[in-house]
Each structure stands twice: as C-alpha cells, then as structure tokens.
Image (cartoon, coloured by chain):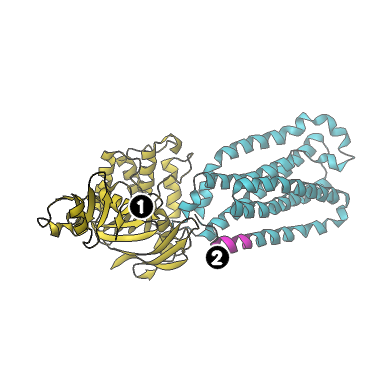
Amino acid sequence: MDILEISDLTKDLGRFRLSDVSLHIPQGCIMGLIGENGAGKSTLIKAILGLIQPDAGEVFYCDKKLDTNDKTVMEQIGVCFDSMHFHEQMTPEWVGRIHAKLYPNWDADCYEKFLQRFDLPMKSQIKGFSKGMQMKLNLAAAFSHHARLLLLDEPTAGLDPVVRDELMDIFLDFVQDETHSILLSTHITADLEKAADYVTFLHNGSLLFTRPTYELQYQFRIARCGEQEFHRLKTEKGAVWRKQDYSYEVLLPEGAALEGKVSCQLDRASIDEIMLMYVKGEQS
Amino acid sequence: MKGLILKDMYLLRKEFKYYALLAVFALLFPVFTKSSSDSIAYNPISTFNSLSPVMVILAINLTLNSFVYDERCGYMQYVFATPVRRSSYVAAKYLSHIMYAGIGSLIGTLCNFMTLIVSGAMRWEYVFQQLIFCLVLFIATLLLGCWEIGLSMKFESTKARMVMLAVIIIAGVLCGVSIFLALHYKEEVQWFLLLLPAAGLLLGSSAWMVWKSFVWARKKEF
C-alpha cells in the first residue's frame, strides 16, 4: 500500500507553476526529491500539507484523501522545513513542552534522547544555535511524535558530513518499520545515493521522472564522445546531451545495456550529473 | 489550542515582566501625585488615574506582539503542518486577547481605586463608577481587538500596527467621551451596559470574518 499518493497536483503561483505532479510513496521507503532551486520541491511539500491550496489534483494518505484538518492524520505526519520555525527566544526544553500540547502522542523521552544524541543543550536559547544545531532541533521535534510519514524539506542543509551520515542512519532506522516512509527533499544528492530507495526529479515545476535509486546508479551512463558517435547516441531512448568545447556529453538512461556496443567510453552517472544534464542539456 | 496559548505566554514573558513593573508604578502613581487630592472630593473626573488607560493599551499591545513573534519565525507555516487547525489558531488569539483585555481593565481599575484610597476620597458611590469604568475599558479593549486581530491576520502585524495607531486615536476619543458621559450621567449608566453586548457582537463578527477567510476559504497561504 502507498502511504502517500499525489495525483495531478497543479498550483499556479503566477511566476511559477507546479504542473500535474503525480507520484506515490510506498510504505517503508525513502523517496528523495531533487531539482534545481525553484523547481517546486518546497511548493510540492507545502501543497501536500495544505499550506497552499492546489488549483487541481489530490493527495491521498493511506488510500484516503488527505484532510489536513483531520488531527489524527496530521499526528502521523512529521515535518521539517529548511528553516527554523521556533522563535529564537525559545529553548529546546520549551519547544518540547509546547509540542507536548500540540501532539497527543508526543514522546518526551524520545525527544530528550534525540537532543542528547544531537548534543543540543536543553536550556539554551535557539538564538545561540548554529544553523546545523537549529536543523537538528527541527529533526528532533519531527521524530518525537511517532510519525509514520516524514516530509523533510532540505533537512541536511547546513549540516557537516559526519552529522549528515548519522542522520541518514537515523532515516534508515526509521524506515525499518515498514509502515514508515520519508519524503526527503535535498540538494545533497550523495545523501540520496546512500539512503533513498527512489528519486523523484522535479524541473521547472514538472515531474521529470521517479526512478529507483539503483536504476539511476547502475543503468544511467554518460558518454563523452565526438560528433559522429554523438549523432548515433542522441537517437537512443531518453538521451540528453550537452555540447562541450571539443566533445559531446550524452546521458543515456539505459546506457548500461550499451556497454561494449559503442566506441566511446561510458561512465556511471552520479545523481548530480543526471540532474545537471536534465537541467542544462537538450533533448530531442 | 493550549499549546498555542502556552507558546504565546512563553514568548511574551519579558513583556509581562515590564507590564508588571509598570502596573506597580501605576498603582503607586497616586502616592506621588497626592498634592491634587483636595479637588478629588469635588471633581469625580480627577479620581481617575491617568495611567489606567495606558495599562489597557499595553494589554492590547501584547496581542499584537504575539503576531510579531509568529511572523518573525514563520511559525504559522510550521504550526499548520501539525495537528493544529487554523480554527484553533484563530480561537487562541481571540481568547488570549480577551484574557489580556480583562487583566488590563482590572489593573486599570485597581489603579483608580488606589487613587481614591490614597486621596482619602473613597466613597461607595465611586465603587460603582469604577466598575462601570472597568467595563468601559474592557469594552474599548475588545473593540480594538476586533480591528487588531483581523488586521494582523489579513495584512500582517507591521501594517496592522500602522492602522492601529490611527484607530487607537479614534477609539481613545470614543473611550474618553464614554467615560466622561458615564460620570456625568450616572443615572443613565445602564445604557453603557449595552456597550458590552455591542462590543461582544463586534468581536464576534470580527472573529467570524477572520474565520471565514482564514479557516474556511484558506485564503492565506504559506
């Protein structure tokens, strides 16, 4: 069963339009959401949460239409935005006290354990926290009410590689319970390579693809070739290319199958390279 | 809703401290200005502590400040992604405002009683006057709250504060005239009691309008 299903979600914000986005997140998985700045990742998360009203489309949570006024449903959804939404005068202790009133299933012990794990002082004001510490506090709050679905908007921004690695382990632990899932928007694609089961790519408000991470890692190839080879490769299914100074780069979604069949070198494409090619490259 | 009120109380704790200090000052104010006590027995207007309306205006400011705190950190965006409904947020703001209005009016009235006690002009007939005065202050605060909360929800607190500055002058004049009339036409004082349901009605209609646009139509997006 899918924990979250988004069907043809559309929102016109004037300068930007989220167009007919459809995706589904199965239970027990981490879905990475990638895309350049302004691609619509945060808008999509806000539309799921009802913070903006979609012009069209629907969101389903566990096969039922998501009603953001339904407390029992919203209790099961944890959120972490890319900035701190607790006032700088607050302390983690008070964040906990207030959340205990907001979430009926708030787990104070779990919250305290996360604070200790993240090395966050209970009684210090948030204004003295670094960006990384603030993000850790956001995450501690998101993890401490036994949510089933976590919607995380760039939660690893501002965190050092050690903490990011630890966080990925926490995310993987979280989805060990197969009723749990995470939608994780990020620019740090290395994190997704480690933890995500699926990657969804948004570009200019439209969904380009949703693919299993292993497919991106093991099937996508980048060919660096001359003009003659380029003209042959550009006709391959889904090929995206970019002209460099003296050569062409061609991204081949099914490039693994072409290994040994082409004269140029085929390299594995990282998620960063795939994103770059789709954003900057050309397609027939 | 409890969580939202708790959060506002926590963030406003500094303001509460300053408010308490000012309340103590306002209560002691008649002691410092005792020299004018001779005229008090003859002029009921002067039985009023000039700081008492200030206590009410500061109480109104608490509600506005709670919006400022929420806006600064984008709290609304976060809180509506939790099980808190928009209706609970609106209700929490109105309830807090009624609470601050009540406390502010009571402190304002206590200041007046202090003036009467210190000047030695305390009479039973003044007790009734003071209770009416307390009611008028409470009504004025509720009326200002109608504007304040509605404007803050619609335009955010900076614009709301600008409009409130203009509104406060009008409301202040109306409040002053009401108090003056209440003192000079004591026998007609029951008419002032009609102001309470009128203020309640206005506050209610303000809440309904905010509710309609913010909760039902969800016009405000984050």
Q: Which residue does the image show at 74% across and 38% down from the upper left?
A: B51
In the depicted structure, whether residue A75 falls above or below residue B12: below
Magenta region, main secondary structure: helix
Residue B123 inside the magenta-drawn segment:
no
Residue A34 spot, x, y in % from top left:
32, 53
- Across and down, in percent, residue B203 comes to 67, 58
Mark 2 sits on what residue? B216
Q: Secondary structure beneath disc 2?
A: helix
Q: Which chain is yellow?
A: A
Instruction: State how far apart marks 1 and 2 are (Cα).
Output: 27 Å
> Crowdedness of circle 1 by 10 Å Cα count: few (<14), some, many (20+)?
many
In the picture as drawn, the residue positioned furthest to the bottom comes out as: A64
Residue appearing at x 59%, y 39% in the figure? B15
Chain B: what color?
A: cyan
Q: Quadrant of the C terminus of chain A?
A: bottom left
Q: Amino acid at mark 1?
A: Leu
Left/right placement of residue B105 relative to residue A178 reads: right
Label 2: how many Cα within 10 Å (few below 14, some 14–19, many 20+): few
Task: Find the residue positioned furthest to the front.
Answer: A228
Q: A3 or A70, which lies in front?
A: A3
Q: Position of residue A278 (x, y in %)?
A: 30, 54
Please indicate, yes or no, whether residue A32 appears anywhere in the rendered image. Answer: no
Q: Which residues are magenta?
A: B207-220
Name the residue carrying label 1: A152
Q: Is residue A139 left or right of residue B104?
A: left
* Frontmost residue, B167 versus A243: A243
Residue B125 visible: yes
Residue B49: percent from the left, percent from the top? 77, 39
Q: Residue at x 41, y 63 (%)?
A: A19
Q: Amino acid at mark 2?
A: Trp
Q: Secondary structure at mark 1?
A: strand
Quarter of the image with the N terminus of chain A is bottom left
